Image (spheres, rainbow, N blue to C red):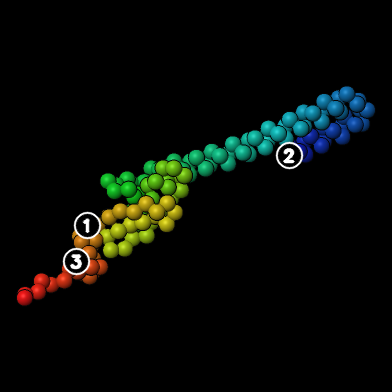
Amino acid sequence: MGLYEGIKDVAKIVQKADNVELYRQLIDLSAQALDMQATINKLTEENAELKKRQDLEERIERHQELYLTLKGDENNIFYCSHCWDSDGKLIQMSTKNGLYQCPHCQQKGIHDKDAYNEKMNKSKPFYAPPKSRKW
């Protein structure tokens, strides 16, 4: 039998006894009991969220650069350390040519210097000085 059903059963008995004061007290107690049940449900939900976050925190690996990875992640996905530390959100970073960037906070940096240098060496300079002329 649940809390609500128990209260209803007791209310029927009190009504039959024709005791108005007892019936009022029962209504007040039932309201308090329902409030406590709502609080218990809220606390249970918060507890589950905290456990989930704690489990996630135990999997986080911090790196010298400003990104995170998760232990056991075969894909080695990069997450933004700033977004995790400030908002508690794992925001996946985009990675390309040795660079990473967060789509949320725009934090960026180099995670693979060799790949970055290779890309930079292959790209043409925006401005090339003119060749010297012989007069």
Q: Which one is in front in this view, the residue at disc 1 or the one at disc 2?
A: 1
Query: In this rendering, would 88 be left or right of 16?
Result: left
Identified at 91% across, 26% down, the residue is 20
Q: Where is residue 78 shown, x and y percent of the image?
A: 35, 54
Q: Kindly state the secondary structure of the residue where label 2 is placed.
A: loop
- The disc placed on residue 113 is 1
**Image quadrant in which the C terminus is located:** bottom left
Looking at the image, the residue that sits furthest to the left is 135
- Check disc 3 and report the residue beneath it: 121
Q: Which comes sooner in the sequence, label 3 or label 1?
A: 1
In the rendered image, is residue 4 in sight? yes
Looking at the image, the residue that sits furthest to the bottom is 135
Residue 116, quarter of picture: bottom left
Q: Kindly state the secondary structure of the residue where label 3 is placed.
A: helix
Q: Kindly state the secondary structure of the residue where label 1 is placed.
A: helix
The amino acid sitting under disc 1 is Lys
Identified at 59% across, 36% down, the residue is 43
Please rate how many residues cluster around mark 2, counting C-alpha atoms within 10 Å: few if below 14, some from 14 to 19, many from 20.
Answer: few
**Image quadrant in which the N terminus is located:** top right
- Check the image and report above or below for 112 versus 36: below
48 and 100: which one is in front? 100
Please rate how many residues cluster around mark 1, counting C-alpha atoms within 10 Å: few if below 14, some from 14 to 19, many from 20.
Answer: few
- Check disc 2 and report the residue beneath it: 1
